[in-house]
Amino acid sequence: MATGHGGKVSLDTSQIGNRAWSFAHVLRDDGLSYQAYIEQITYLLFLKMADEVTKPPYDQKPIVPAPYDWPNLVKRDGVDLEAHYRKTLEELGKRGGMLGTIFLKAKNEIADPAKLRRLIVDLIDRDNWMGLGADVKGTIYEELLQRSAAESPKGAGQYFTPRPVIEAVVDVMQPTPDDGICDPAAGTGGFLLAAYQYVIDHHGKDMNRSQLKRVKEKLVEGMELVPNTARLCAMNLYLHGIGGDDSPVHAGHDSLAKAWGRRYSMVLTNPPFGKKSSVSYVNEDGELE
């Protein structure tokens, strides 16, 4: 256990992961699905980290408007907290860039304001997330996604490809820093993460600052039809330190129906086999297909 920025305690990966998952079971008793819980974690964690980077040593310009930032959320309680949280999600979902991707069609699924308050204060606010490092934050989040997939096998295939499959494909393809890599059915971003990590592991020490920046911001890009899954992907990449001011994940794009418009040197994907996307047309016999 180590003390993080601002005197708050930072736990190791497994401790935070276990603590986060314990909240899932509490909210499960109230009818909240595991995936819905991960989405709520995503909203709150993003708001907390967006606030942390406005303070030393980062001193970045705020990207979340003041009425809807973390300090305005964490100071509230009861019905006031629930109403303000609902309004925050609604307003941020109207924005562009990373905010728009994370909060698109976001809504509060936690009916009990007391449990929402516990989630904010006891899980998210007590740690310095920016001080954990991208590998630790990303590992915690990926662990939550994996647990959610394991507990929800019916819909897991929609967004979660087994890690050994991803790593085998990336090892065969051997991406380089000069590649432009796309996953047109990105899910939670497993292929994009693995490709990025492969480049860092195999070429990182040979790259200068400019090349590292390019790899972080331009190496990978994904499209995801389902907004809820796209937000998980965007957050997963963000926590791993991937992306710039704009999200590398594009929500709501149907890659089976329309090309994105950019060219890539490499495509890594687990093609969609579901029925979320379909095109109807009238055939030569006048029948609908």
Image (cartoon, rainbow, N blue to C red):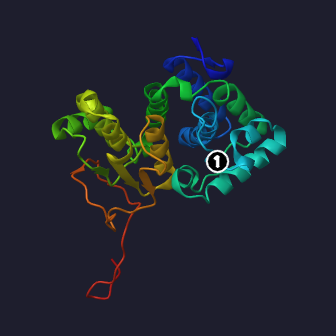
In the rendered image of this protein, does residue 89 appear above or below residue 207? below
> Disc 1 residue type?
Val
Residue 156 percent location from the top left of the image = 42, 42
Residue name at image x 79 percent, y 42 percent: 81
In the rendered image of this protein, does residue 113 appear above or below residue 57? below
Q: In which quarter of the image is the N terminus?
A: top right
Q: Quadrant of residue 111?
A: top right
> Does dot 1 land on a helix, a strand or a loop?
loop
Depth check, front residue: 150 or 68: 68
Residue name at image x 72 percent, y 36 percent: 116
Residue name at image x 61 percent, y 56 percent: 93
In the rendered image of this protein, does residue 139 appear above or below residue 88? above
Picture mark count: 1
Depth check, front residue: 151 or 102: 102
Residue placed farthest to the left in the image? 172
Can residue 247 be seen in this snapshot?
A: yes
Residue placed farthest to the top in the image? 1
User: Mark 1 = which residue?
Assistant: 64
Depth check, front residue: 56 or 249: 56
Residue 212 percent location from the top left of the image = 33, 37
In the rendered image of this protein, does residue 267 appear above or below residue 241? below
Q: Quadrant of residue 242?
A: top left
Residue 101 percent location from the top left of the image = 52, 53
Depth check, front residue: 104 or 66: 66
Can residue 112 be seen in this snapshot?
A: no
184 with respect to 98 (left or right): left
Residue name at image x 35 percent, y 53 percent: 185
Q: Quadrant of the C terminus?
A: bottom left
**Residue neighbourhood size for the residue with mark 1, other residues' Cα within 10 Å, grouped as few (<14), some (14–19), many (≥20):** some
167 with respect to 240 (left or right): left
